[in-house]
């Protein structure tokens, strides 16, 4: 990575109110250092960090991803109730889940039409609506 990508990562953390520790900066650089959005799992981010030579444990990756979600700079998308993907694009948008590849990608928002949601039960409100469209080869 480059000094510029480290600076982008550090600024991303500071803007979110997170302390830019060495491990956080290393993981943030992999997530946003090039300015592109991506979908990662904790395991794939851990492998990328290892390949880059960063000394982080898988537990640290999980804890850091949780902190990034709590700070609002990552969105967690759960597939099958057990597999979580983390998206750097935190705006509401639908996703494709490619079953054959165990991969998540953005789906075109402009093609999704939700005409009506059910009313929330009394005393609660709808916080968000997650749309994951599962795909498999014919």
Image: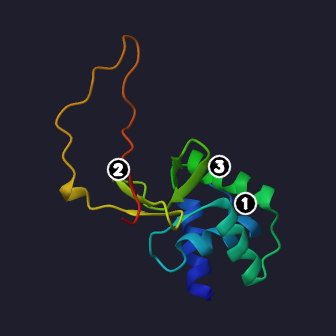
- Residue 92's disc is 2
Task: Determine which quarter of the picture holds residue 107.
Answer: bottom left
- Which SS class for mark 3? helix
Would residue 67 appear left or right of 102 to someone viewing this image? right
On the image, numbered disc 1 is attached to which residue?
A: 61
Residue 17 visible to the viewer: no
Distance in Å between CA atoms under marks 2 and 3: 19 Å
Q: Position of residue 52 (x, y in %)?
A: 72, 83
Give the mark nearest the N terminus, 3 or 1.
1
Residue 53: x %, y % from top left? 78, 82
Q: Residue at x 45, y 69 (%)?
A: 37
**Residue located beneath label 3 in the image:** 66
Q: Nearer the viewer, residue 53 or 129?
A: 129
Secondary element type, mark 2 = loop
Sequence-first disc among 2 and 3: 3
Q: CA distance from mark 2 to mark 1?
A: 24 Å
Looking at the picture, tell me which residue is in the foreground, 73 or 100. 100
Q: Which mark is on residue 44?
A: none
Tell me where residue 21 appears, x and y as whole percent: 74, 64
Considering every residue shown, the one lying at the far front of the view is 138
């Amino acid at each position: 990575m480059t000094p510029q990508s480290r600076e982008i990562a550090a600024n991303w953390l500071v803007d979110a109110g997170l302390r830019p520790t060495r491990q956080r900066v290393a993981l943030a650089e992999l997530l946003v250092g090039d300015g592109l959005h991506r979908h990662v799992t904790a395991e794939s981010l851990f492998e990328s960090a290892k390949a880059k030579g960063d000394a982080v444990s898988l537990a640290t990756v999980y804890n850091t991803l949780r902190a990034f979600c709590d700070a609002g700079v990552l969105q967690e998308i759960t597939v099958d109730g057990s597999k979580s993907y983390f998206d750097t694009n935190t705006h509401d948008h639908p996703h494709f889940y490619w079953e054959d590849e165990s991969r998540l990608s953005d789906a075109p928002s402009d093609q999704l039409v939700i005409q009506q949601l059910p009313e929330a039960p009394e005393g609660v409100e709808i916080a968000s609506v997650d749309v994951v469209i599962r795909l498999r080869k014919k």
